[in-house]
Image (cartoon, helix red, strand yellow):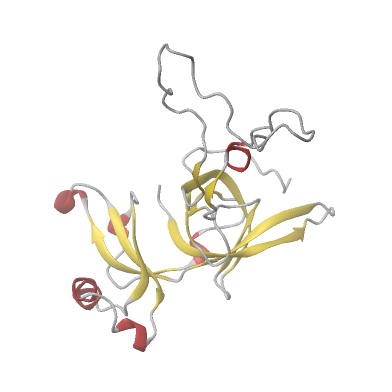
């Protein structure tokens, strides 16, 4: 992987190709990201960039812990809200203080987008696992319609097997959607339009990076 950037999911929209095809797109405000630290194989054992995204206001910057303030002070970069590592093969091409902008990507590039899905709290098996309701729906059958149902065998093995789909915490998971296509790049507004949906609610942090699985051709542009 040779290019990646941090961004914020703005929402969804649609654009049209010259032949009138509608493309559903997700709008991502990507960058600019400041390089805070360059890690190399010789010094750190692997190649990566530590980058910051979305500068703090002067008032909020005072609330950052002193160790984190020291990282930005050493790099002579304004304190940022998000600080992440991007494992890039060509990290040696960058220097501390460089700015990564959305124009590192071009129309037609294939990207993997990583984000955190919307948290839904504690949910039952119907919402969490798309299970069916159980039992007859007539009166007198009891409040069991949205229950998980039978959990295991009788006296043998006398326990619930691992990975049984049950009620529990749903959402707020780190998810990566692979092989999405960049359909437009607006360098003036730091915006990338990516075909399809990506994980996370509006204004959530996402990482857009060069796809690991190379797809052939474009689905939208011939």
x and y percent of residue 80 in the render? 35, 74
Residue at the limit of the structure toward the top, as seen here? 156
Which of the two residues, 211 or 68, is positioned nearer the viewer here?
68
Residue at the limit of the structure toward the front, as seen here? 140
Q: Quadrant of the C terminus?
A: top right
Q: In this view, does 78 lie to the left or right of 138?
A: left
Count of marks placed on residues: 0
Residue at the limit of the structure toward the bottom, as seen here? 59
x and y percent of residue 200 in the render? 54, 56
Residue at the limit of the structure toward the right, as seen here? 20
Q: Is residue 155 left or right of residue 216?
A: left
* 18 shown above or below 155: below
* 111 shown above or below 141: below
**Residue 157 picture quarter:** top left
x and y percent of residue 185 in the render? 60, 64
Which of the two residues, 212 or 81, is positioned nearer the viewer here?
81
x and y percent of residue 75 in the render? 23, 74
Q: Looking at the image, which residue is at 29% across and 77% down?
A: 77
Q: Looking at the image, which residue is at 20% across and 48% down?
A: 41
Q: In this view, does 109 lie to the left or right of 209?
A: right
* 69 shown above or below 114: below
């Amino acid at each position: 992987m040779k290019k990646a950037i941090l961004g914020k999911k703005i929402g969804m929209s649609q654009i049209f190709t010259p032949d009138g095809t509608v493309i559903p797109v997700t709008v991502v405000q990507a960058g600019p990201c400041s390089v805070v630290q360059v890690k190399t194989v010789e010094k750190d054992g692997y190649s990566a960039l530590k980058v910051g995204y979305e500068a703090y206001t002067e008032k909020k910057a005072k609330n950052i812990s002193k160790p984190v303030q020291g990282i930005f002070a050493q790099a002579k970069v304004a304190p940022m809200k998000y600080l992440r590592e991007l494992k890039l093969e060509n990290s040696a091409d960058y220097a501390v203080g460089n700015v990564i902008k959305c124009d590192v990507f071009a129309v037609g590039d294939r990207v993997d987008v990583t984000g955190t899905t919307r948290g839904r709290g504690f949910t039952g098996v119907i919402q969490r696992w798309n299970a069916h309701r159980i039992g007859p729906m007539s009166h007198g059958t009891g409040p069991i319609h949205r229950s998980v149902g039978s959990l295991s065998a009788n006296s043998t093995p006398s326990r619930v097997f691992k990975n049984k789909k049950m009620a529990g915490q749903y959402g707020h998971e780190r998810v990566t959607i692979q092989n999405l296509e960049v359909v437009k790049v607006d360098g003036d507004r730091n915006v990338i339009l990516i075909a399809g949906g990506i994980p996370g609610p509006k204004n959530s942090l996402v990482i857009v990076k060069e796809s690991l699985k190379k797809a052939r051709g474009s689905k939208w542009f011939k």
